[in-house]
Image: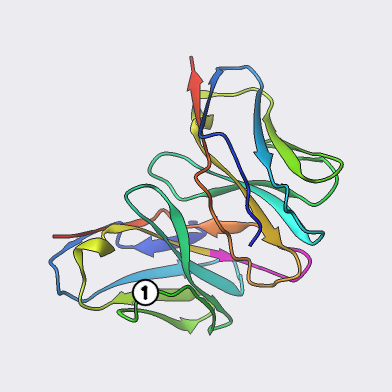
Amino acid sequence: DAKTTQPNSMESNEEEPVHLPCNHSTISGTDYIHWYRQLPSQGPEYVIHGLTSNVNNRMASLAIAEDRKSSTLILHRATLRDAAVYYCILLDGSSNTGKLIFGQGTTLQVKP
Amino acid sequence: DTAVSQTPKYLVTQMGNDKSIKCEQNLGHDTMYWYKQDSKKFLKIMFSYNNKELIINETVPNRFSPKSPDKAHLNLHINSLELGDSAVYFCASSQAKTGRNTEAFFGQGTRLTVV
């Protein structure tokens, strides 16, 4: 299973943009890049996913490097509610299991 | 309406007991999962069912037995509970399709404490 590398923790100020990096140098051509987050005492929550092109949704943007070996989750204006553990996960598009392999993720702290 | 609901939310039990955790999803998804989050917060998949058929079994002790009576339900039964089984168990569902893996929805978790 392809692996991802993320910083253990990051800090941000409220209402400022946050860029959460993820390295996935062994990504294969069929791997989708998924991001989930886990708020305190809750289950993981889907944030966004992409394959090759940058993606935007109401929660965040996903910027994918041209060689696909890294990606960045962008929260445009962090709020206190965005404090969570963010997981970058590769999901094999040639498999229909939907199996998610979680790493240690990045713990994001948002300061008022 | 809660998309993925699991019961109970908290479960405290003695070593050696048998217990079950129930999960239901109202999203019409074909695939359901059980994940375990240990005390160090690592999340790991345990089982997955697709249309009531077991498709993932991640070397989990056979004291753990998932049961899927229909595609909207996936229950987890644990026999002879041990201290090391203490964890938060998450149920999830998705409409996983080859070449178009979609988002998974997770329940709120069941915190199991074995004493």
Which residue is more in the foreground, A70 or A86?
A: A70
Label 1 neighbourhood size at 10 Å, few (<14), some (14-19), many (20+)?
A: some
Secondary structure found at label 1: strand
* Residue A39 rendering spot, x and y as whole percentages: 46, 40
Image quarter of the C terminus of chain B: bottom left
Dominant secondary structure, magenta: loop
Q: Residue at x 15, y 74 (%)?
A: B16
| Outermost residue to the front | A26
| Residue A72 appears in the rendering | yes
Which residue is more in the foreground, B6 or A99?
A: A99
* Residue A8 rendering spot, x and y as whole percentages: 51, 34
Which residue is more in the foreground, A95 or A68?
A: A68
Q: Quadrant of residue A87?
A: top right
* Residue B49 shown left or right of residue A64 in the figure: left
* Residue A28 shown left or right of residue A7 in the figure: right
* Residue A80 shown left or right of residue A40 in the figure: right
What count of labels does the image hold? Answer: 1
Instruction: Report in which chain the residue with disc 1 lies.
Output: B
Question: Is residue B23 magenta-colored?
Answer: no
| Residue A57 appears in the rendering | no
Q: Which residue is mark 1?
A: B76
Q: Quadrant of residue A72?
A: top right
* Residue B90 rendering spot, x and y as whole percentages: 42, 60
* Residue A75 rendering spot, x and y as whole percentages: 66, 29
Q: Residue at x 50, y 22 (%)?
A: A110
The boundaries of the magenta stretch are B93-100
Give the residue type that dot 1 points to: Leu
